[in-house]
Image (cartoon, grey):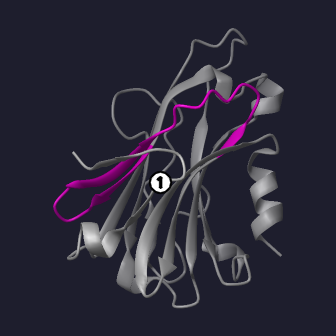
Amino acid sequence: MGISLSKGGRIDLSKEAPSLKKVGVGLGWDTNDSDTGENFDLDASVFMITASGKIPSDKYFVFYNNLNSPDGAIVHQGDNRTGEGDGDDESLFIELSKIDPSIEELVFVVTIDEAQARNQNFGQVHNAFIRIYDLDSNKEIAKYDLEEDFSVEIAIEFGRLYKKSGSWRFKAVGTGFNSGLQGFVDKFIG
């Protein structure tokens, strides 16, 4: 069991896991039974951000339609369209040494596909979490359980991996947005 983080909590991966080379990022959630008659499809994405606060090109936006970053550092394990079962619903594997040197931050978001058309939001989602673990040993380093009640939001920034003083750190964010995936695309691309 890793460190349990609360909103805004941070850890230095080089101190908590000095031999860490490959990071697993697991994201999970459960959904209420929908009274809209539609199934939920939540999607995990990562934006690879430079010092400019933007991604260098569209290829640095890793999601269900672009499963690999151009530097080979991030591999998205695919879209879980139902969220059924226990544990991680979607996962990303990251090889820290391969991350393009211009990348300073990895922003992990989860959005609800077609949320507005299906009348769905994160108020209908519970047990959401992001966890960071050593991919080689499968040992959990840190976990952030989103305890906040997001009543109308359709997108959540779960957390960030960022470089500071030459080491990678993780921050639990837990901020909701009403703009969906397009809001993040508008913010980080261009």
Marks counted in the figure total 1
Q: Tell me where the magenta segment starts and ends, as one range.
A: 130-156
Q: Is residue 47 left or right of residue 3?
A: right
Judge by depth and name the residue closer to the eye, 46 or 114: 46
Q: Is residue 122 left or right of residue 27?
A: right
Residue 50 is covered by the magenta coloring: no
Q: Which residue is mark 1?
A: 9
Q: Which quarter of the picture shows residue 133?
A: bottom left
Q: Which quadrant is home to the C terminus?
A: bottom right
Answer few, some or many: residues within 10 Å of disc 1's Cα (few below 14, many 20 plus, some between 14 and 19): few
**Percent x, y of residue 186:** 83, 62
Judge by depth and name the residue closer to the eye, 123 or 33: 123
Q: Which quarter of the picture shows residue 122?
A: top right
**Percent x, y of residue 55:** 69, 77
Measuring 20% from the left and 55% from the top, which residue is drawn there?
A: 138
Residue 141 is covered by the magenta coloring: yes
Measuring 56% from the left and 16% from the top, which residue is drawn there?
A: 32
Mark 1 falls on what kind of element?
loop
